[in-house]
Amino acid sequence: MGIDVTYYRAITRAGLLLRTIAILSAVAVVSMVSPAHAADPKPDAIIKNRTIEARVLLDDRIKADPALAADCLAESKKWLEKNAADAASTRKQDPQFFQNGGWDFERKYTVRSVVADRYVSLIRADYMDTHGAHPNSDVNTILWDKAQAKRISIRPFFTETADNGATMKAMQKAVVASLRIEKKKRDAGETATNEWFKSVEPSLLKIGAVTLAPSTEAGKSSGLTFHFPPYAVGPYAEGEYVAFASWETLKPYLTPEGARIFGGARPKGDEDDGQ
């Protein structure tokens, strides 16, 4: 019996269509699990060679302020060069540490809050992978005064900030109390001990990296948040911690400028995010 040519062509077209659909589906799956590298943010500064890739990323709000962006990049240039030099030195002395590739470093600057359209709090988050037991991370903060176009401390907001003075002791007490609450939320109460908190000293330089917390009241700050990297106030597995001291707690120590910029309450979303 002869084969119906029309029927044969229809079957062939159907088979080709099914194979095409299968190929497209497979491509779609690969695309979903392996997003294009081009989608990654473009670094604002980078050093890349066989020994290290170290990159710096600024968020858009920082780049919108040329003076602030220049300040961050000037700081980061030193950070890039130091880490590149350390990697090159280590490779020369211990090349086995680079059998699986070069070191990987990343520094991100993000805006945490803008208060009174003048004081900008930044988070500076570092990631470091030197092929040890696990990657490491660090966090620090910057307070930028737009009016003066320079970095400042929180000193202008308080009548005194002497080591072991009344202001710093009040801050220390609030920070430790907040950390105890955060540890309880994480079921990490067993590490809520004075031993872990001994690094939180009543000193502006030793109490923790500080930012102005956002507020429910526009243009105001609800208090201070203190940012601690892994290992600072708990084991590595507990990760970073953020402690909060409300402005009401520190009200007796505020200068007129401090009284002007603080107010309102900490937004619930900010508290939930642990920022």
Image (spheres, rainbow, N blue to C red):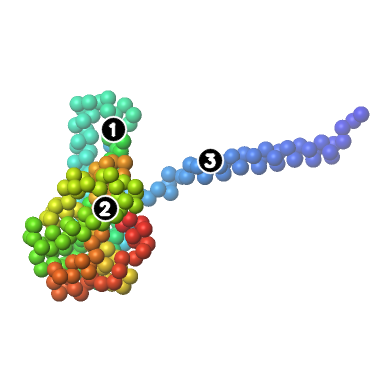
The mark lying in front, picked from 3 and 2, is 2
Q: Are marks 1 and 3 in contact (CB under 8 Å)?
A: no
Amino acid type, residue under disc 3 in the picture: Val
- What residue do we see at 43% from left, 47% from top? 38
Q: Secondary structure at mark 2?
A: helix
- What residue do we see at 47% from left, 45% from top? 35
Q: Mark number for residue 180?
A: 2
Residue nearer the viewer, 230 or 177: 177
Residue 176 in view (yes/no): yes
* Of pointers 1 and 2, the one earlier in the residue sequence: 1
Residue nearer the viewer, 219 or 17: 219
Residue bearing the label numbered 3? 30
In the rendered view of the protein, which quadrant contains the N terminus? Answer: top right
- What residue do we see at 53% from left, 40% from top? 30
In the image, is 67 to the left or to the right of 4?
A: left
Q: Are marks 1 and 2 in contact (CB under 8 Å)?
A: no
Q: Residues within 10 Å of mark 2 (few under 14, many from 20)?
A: some
Q: Residues within 10 Å of mark 3 (few under 14, many from 20)?
A: few
In the rendered view of the protein, which quadrant contains the C terminus? Answer: bottom left
Q: Secondary structure at mark 1?
A: loop
Q: In the image, is residue 223 above or below residue 275?
A: below
Residue nearer the viewer, 214 or 42: 214
Q: Mark number for residue 132?
A: 1
* Of pointers 3 and 2, the one earlier in the residue sequence: 3
| Percent position of residue 21, x then y | 66, 42
In the image, is 155 to the left or to the right of 246?
A: left
Q: Are marks 3 and 2 in contact (CB under 8 Å)?
A: no
* Of pointers 1 and 3, the one earlier in the residue sequence: 3
Q: Calculate the distance from the C-alpha at mark 1 to the C-alpha at mark 2.
A: 30 Å
Q: Quadrant of residue 236?
A: top left
- What residue do we see at 24% from left, 43% from top? 231
Amino acid type, residue under disc 2 in the picture: Arg
